[in-house]
Image (cartoon, rainbow, N blue to C red):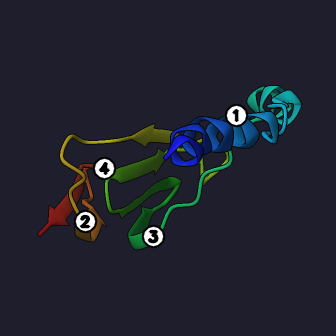
Amino acid sequence: MNFHVLLIPLTCLTLMACEAPLVLDGVEQSKKQPIHRTDRIQTAATSGDDVVIAGIGFILNSNDAGKTWKRTQPEGLPAFLSATICPDNTQVLVTA
């Protein structure tokens, strides 16, 4: 009976003693790097220099033929199915 009473605390102490030290050097280095994001494009439209690209939860706009981009993230992560740019440069996106 005494052996079983000591077995649990000794096992816990052994497991705690074997734990490797926590090294977070890689985490700090990765925080300094730029954000790399992957989006799944579902629809795109162009009209002259205007470009609109959309997918699940994001819209990318450019009015200089893709040299610079503006990202918009609508609430609720809508899935955009179709996009068009009207002659007056109004952008229309259809969501499910």
Kind of element beneath mark 3: strand
Task: Name the foreground residue: 52 vs 76.
Answer: 76
Residue 5 falls left or right of residue 55: right
Comparing labels 4 and 3, the label whose residue is closer to the camera: 3
- Mark 3 highlights which residue? 41
Q: Is residue 29 above or below residue 54?
A: above
Residue 38 falls left or right of residue 28: left
Residue 80, numbered circle: 2
Kind of element beneath mark 2: strand
Q: Position of residue 77 (x, y in %)?
A: 25, 52
Residue 89, numbered circle: 4
- The CA distance from mark 4 to mark 2 is 19 Å
Residue 13, numbered circle: 1
Kind of element beneath mark 4: loop
Q: Position of residue 85 (x, y in %)?
A: 30, 60
Q: Amino acid at mark 2?
A: Phe
Q: Quadrant of the C terminus?
A: bottom left
Residue 35 visible within the image: no
Comparing labels 1 and 4, the label whose residue is closer to the camera: 1
Task: Name the foreground residue: 88 vs 5.
Answer: 5
- The CA distance from mark 1 to mark 4 is 69 Å
- The CA distance from mark 2 to mark 3 is 9 Å
Q: Residue furthest left?
A: 96
- The CA distance from mark 2 to mark 1 is 55 Å
Of labels 2 and 3, earlier in sequence is 3
